[in-house]
Image: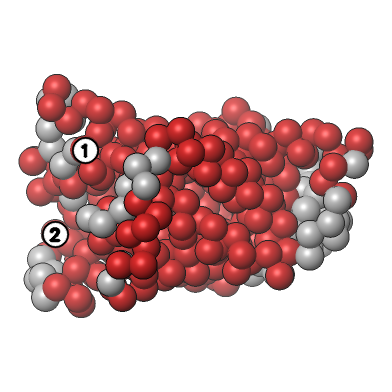
Amino acid sequence: MEVAAPQPSDSNTVSAFSNSPFARKPMLAFAVLLAVNAMWAFQFSGARIATSELSAVLVTLLPLAIATLLVMPFARLNLDLFRPANRTILLDVFLLGTVGVLPAQLGLVLGVQRTLASNASVLSLTVPVLTAISASLFLHEHMTKLRWISFAIAILGVCLISIKDIQHAQLFSIEYVTGNLFVLASCAGSAFNNSFSRRALSRFSPAQVLVWSFIVTDLELVLIYAITGRGDWSQLAQLGPSVWWSLILVAIFSLGLSMILYFSVIQAVEVMRAALSVYMLPVFGVLFSAALLGEKLTPNLIAGGVLIFISCFLVTVYEEKQRLRGLKVSGDV
């Protein structure tokens, strides 16, 4: 089912006629982006649990395959993607799966196995910046003065939260260079997927774009496993409930529901605005640690979280309300 979601020729101006439920509802978009990042934050711990018993390729493939099957009934897939008129979108979907989803997911799993957690945490801070660069290159979005200020506030907040990781990071250690490169590839893949997906979303629904790009990645992972696999399919029958639950929860929330919500939001909100919300990931990571592991919330963590929250609010809610107010004054609404 094709979706008529008109997109402006200049991506810096979100179409007033967007079919997204988040159009002209900046507070709703802001709340959903917070929920999306909370779901993304769980993926790190879920991957660590599973990699203790399975290879990196299977840890990547299983939740992706589960997510594909779970979302497929809602996508109402047909062969529209393969029509000659949609050849460009078909190429975009292939690139999303190959350059976006595959390195983002497999690189993350391979990276956390080969580098320090502090290194991975510091490198993950590049995702919003890389997403903004991708949005500028592929969508022609632009940084405004408010966005520069908001990014600066968010980076300050992240530094407060991640000060221990920054102090203990060994980014240039030869011992961890391979793992660091995998994590960096994961960050680049996430940034590409977070921005480039909007091109396909101009013609197809979030569920369709998600499923088609996941199918591409699933097939590529099966091929990689066929070449490098070590026969650990037999270990699936021996996996404990905690591993299965981690894989299933990653599939449902970190890969399925969160991505559908994110794709729905960027149909109405510029990618650069949504990108800044990724800095909420360490905030939720700290909150999860406090709730599940009993870690204490320090003044630095609280202050950093407040700064990041403010920066995300400025670009997601305040800037959008200013834009809508300008449209009303000019009579475009």
Q: Quadrant location of the N terminus?
A: bottom right
Q: Amino acid at mark 1?
A: Arg
The quadrant in which residue 38 appears is bottom left
- Is 92 positioned to the left or the right of 167 in the image? right
- Between the residue at mark 2 and the residue at mark 1, the CA separation in whole angstroms equals 29 Å
Q: Earlier in the sequence, mark 2 or mark 1?
A: 1
Q: Are marks 2 and 1 in contact (CB under 8 Å)?
A: no
State whether residue 177 is above or below residue 198: above
Say what secondary structure mark 2 lies in. helix
State whether residue 156 is above or below residue 303: above
State whether residue 234 is above or below residue 198: below
Q: How many marks?
A: 2
Residue at figure coordinates x 23%, y 43% from the top left: 113
Say what secondary structure mark 1 lies in. helix
State whether residue 281 is above or below residue 199: below
Task: Quickly name the residue at label 2.
Answer: 300
Q: Is residue 137 visible?
A: yes
Residue at figure coordinates x 69%, y 41% from the top left: 93
- Is 74 positioned to the left or the right of 176 in the image? right
Residue 166 x/y as whole percent: 14, 41
Q: Quadrant location of the C terminus?
A: bottom right
Q: Residues within 10 Å of mark 1 (few under 14, many from 20)?
A: some
The quadrant in which residue 115 appears is top left
Residue in front for this viewpoint, 259 or 9: 259
Residue 324 x/y as whole percent: 69, 60
Task: Quickly name the residue at label 1.
Answer: 114
Residue at figure coordinates x 45%, y 41% from the top left: 225
Residue in front for this viewpoint, 74 or 283: 74
Residue at figure coordinates x 78%, y 53% from the top left: 204
Q: Is residue 100 visible?
A: no
Residue 314 x/y as whole percent: 46, 57
